[in-house]
Amino acid sequence: MAEERRAMRTPFPASAESRKPRLKKGQEFPILEKQNWLIHLHYIRKDYEACKAVIKEQLQETQGLCEYAIYVQALIFRLEGNIQESLELFQTCAVLSPQCADNLKQVARSLFLLGKHKAATEVYNEAAKLNQKDWEICHNLGVCYIYLKQFSKAQEQLHNALHLNRHDLTYIMLGKIHLLEGDLDKAIEIYKKAVEFSPENTELLTTLGLLYLQLGIYQKAFEHLGNALTYDPTNYKAILAAGSMMQTHGDFDVALTKYRVVACAVPESPPLWNNIGMCFFGKKKYVAAISCLKRANYLAPFDWKILYNLGLVHLTMQQYASAFHFLSAAINLQPKMGELYMLLAVALTNLEDPENAKRAYAEAIRLDKCNPLVNLNYAVLLYNQGEKKGALAQYQEMEKKVNLLKDSSSLEFDSEMIEMAQKLGAALQVGEALVWTKPVKDTKSKHRTTSASKAGGFQQPLGSNQALGQAMSSAAAHRKLPSGAGGVSQLPKPPSLPLEPEPTTEAHPTEASAQIREK
């Protein structure tokens, strides 16, 4: 009976396979990507050296066929700045899984970082065929088209991205397109929608406030900048913009208080030191102004506005050689601005170089068609050189521009400028009544200009009436230029944008005036 029972238990002999020892619980299985969890753990902990060691071991075991290990290694290479190596690895992942849209997105991202924007758009379009409802693909396609200056396609892709998923960054890039096209109204509409969607985003609030500031809508500008500071009291962009607005209205002490806060956050900011310098200039502390402006010039040697301000301050201090140096450097960087040539002519006149001063005035007149002060200064120079016929021609041209400005705007002229024009008219025997056909208010204008010393008599050389103009404070990417007569013109913005938004701040003119005596 015992033998029968044993036979029933083993009806046939056990195979060799069944005699192998069974794997215990928790023992490793020989699968292709068994260490992916460890690779992922090291990567999210940013322990990249350990992660690369595990990846190397994994690739050796799988003979380079572990897609996840290759993918993570490519990400690490990109973080380390090895963009070309990361591109090659992502391309390997795309070959291993050609239907994976994420691999194509990473290939396109690497191409974008290498500056190959057209190739990046082609790869993004291939990825879009695999996944048509991916917000990231549409957004990045729009950014690539911005770099290629295909703004209509960029707007289409960004609108598609907003339709799929409303995102702050997409609103910002869409607004930047309108700014590049010079359409401030559309840009404001986009940023208003963005603020409605994300009312606590300080970047959006600051940008919208700066746009209102550029249009001169100070109430709304102050409101949005104040909201930005409410959510983030240390937002140095909003503080700098608020200080610039106060500086524009002549509240130099309050502006300096704001700038002290900004100096703690960004002590090496060129716009900050430029604005501080012009605050001291407005307070007539010229040595302190030059010190701050030279620090700004050290930090941003190719910013023409800082050089403009340095030339302005040196003219005020009657240091004409230094003024000539800085104004010449500003002209090399901004050769299309007539006021720079006029100030250069003032410096040349005081350096006793009338011939080159005449050439500078002629260039200023060619570039600036609406500023009467250029013609007035030129007329004074010609009169002092004994060229009364040329002085009369410039005087009459000045009268035409003044009449056009009075008819087209409510701009008020400085009383000192009016007095100099009347004296010059009397000296040229055209009569004081012909200078101003309409009464002009004898008050300080917002766009203040200055005249030089008063002439003792009409037989003596007349003073050199200066248009020292609006000293610019470079607080922004959307800048305004002074035209001397109160108008402004847009300075073109760089044509390309990164995937992340750039700081958007705004420049505002600081009022400045000085008296320069002609030798």
Image (tube, helix red, strand yellow):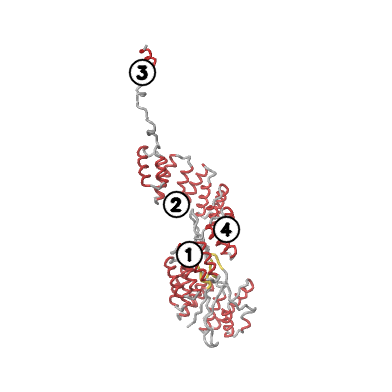
Distance between the alpha carbons at the discs numbered 3 and 2: 66 Å
Looking at the picture, how far across and down is residue 393, in whole percent? Answer: 57, 79
The quadrant of the image that shows the N terminus is top left
Q: Nearer the viewer, residue 225 or 390?
A: 225
Q: Which mark is residue 261?
A: 1
Q: Secondary structure at mark 3?
A: loop
Quadrant in the rendering for residue 56: top left
Q: Secondary structure at mark 2?
A: helix
Q: Position of residue 430 (x, y in %)?
A: 61, 84
Q: Amino acid at mark 4?
A: Ala
Dot 1 falls on a residue whose secondary structure is helix
**Label whose residue precedes the other's in the sequence (3 or 2):** 3
Q: Residue at x 46, y 78 (%)?
A: 317
The Cα atoms of the two marked residues, 1 and 3, are separated by: 88 Å
Q: Residues within 10 Å of mark 1 (few under 14, many from 20)?
A: some
* CA–CA distance in space, label 4 to label 3: 84 Å
Residue 208 percent coordinates (x, y):
56, 59
The residue that label 2 is drawn on is 113
Q: Nearer the viewer, mark 4 or mark 1?
A: 1
For the residue marked with disc 3, what is the amino acid?
Pro
Residue at 48 percent across and 55 percent down: it is 498
For the residues carrying marks 1 and 2, which lies nearer the camera in this image?
1
Q: Alpha-carbon distance for marks 4 and 1?
A: 29 Å
Q: Which residue is mark 3?
A: 13
**Which circle, 4 or 3, is nearer the viewer?**
3
User: Which residue is denoted by mark 4 in the rendering?
Assistant: 187
Q: Secondary structure at mark 4?
A: helix
